């Protein structure tokens, strides 16, 4: 799993079956300071995230297929949650 910030939308009027009725977002991985760490990736959203949100993303195929309950899902990254903050050693870290 990775933390990422939503930086854009992907508009695709024609999608594969596993993406129908789903929102596709552009996310960029961040560290615990909220700074970008890696290039952006495309992720299917299951958490109703929006631009500017900090999100939790999984990139493991079996986990994605299990969550989607679809063994043939053509998904490389899946947004599974919107993160309000992270707590480390009892200290709250804001990521917005």
Image (spheres, rainbow, N blue to C red):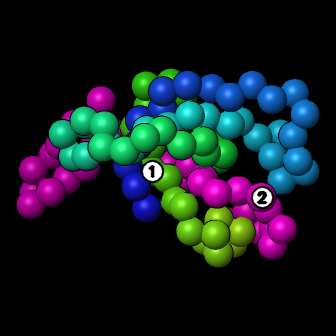
Q: Magenta stretch?
A: 67-96
In the rendered image, residue 82, in percent from the top left (x then y), is placed at 46, 42
Q: Residue 77, labelled with which disc?
A: none
Sooner in the amino-acid sequence: mark 2 or mark 1:
1
The residues bearing labels 2 and 1 have C-alpha atoms spaced at a distance of 19 Å
What residue is shown at x 64% (from left), y 75% (from top)? 62
Which residue was labeled with disc 1? 56
Q: In the displayed structure, would residue 16 be above or below residue 28?
A: below
The structure residue drawn at horizontal position 66% and vertical position 45%, both measured from the top left corner, is: 44
Q: Quadrant of residue 21?
A: top right
Tell me which residue sits at (68%, 28%) in the image: 10
Quarter of the image that includes the C terminus = top left
Residue 83 appearing in the image: no
* SS at badge 1: strand
Quarter of the rendering containing residue 95: top left
* Residue underneath mark 2: 74
Q: Is residue 54 magenta?
A: no
């Amino acid at each position: 799993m990775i933390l990422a910030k939503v930086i854009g939308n992907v508009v695709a009027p024609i999608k594969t079956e596993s993406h129908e009725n789903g929102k596709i977002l552009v996310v960029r991985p961040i560290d615990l300071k909220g700074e970008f760490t890696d290039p952006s990736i495309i992720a299917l959203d299951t958490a109703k995230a929006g631009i500017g949100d900090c999100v939790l993303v999984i990139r493991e195929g079996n986990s994605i297929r299990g969550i989607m309950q679809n063994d043939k899902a053509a998904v490389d990254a899946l947004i599974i949650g919107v993160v309000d903050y992270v707590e480390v050693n009892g200290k709250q870290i804001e990521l917005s």
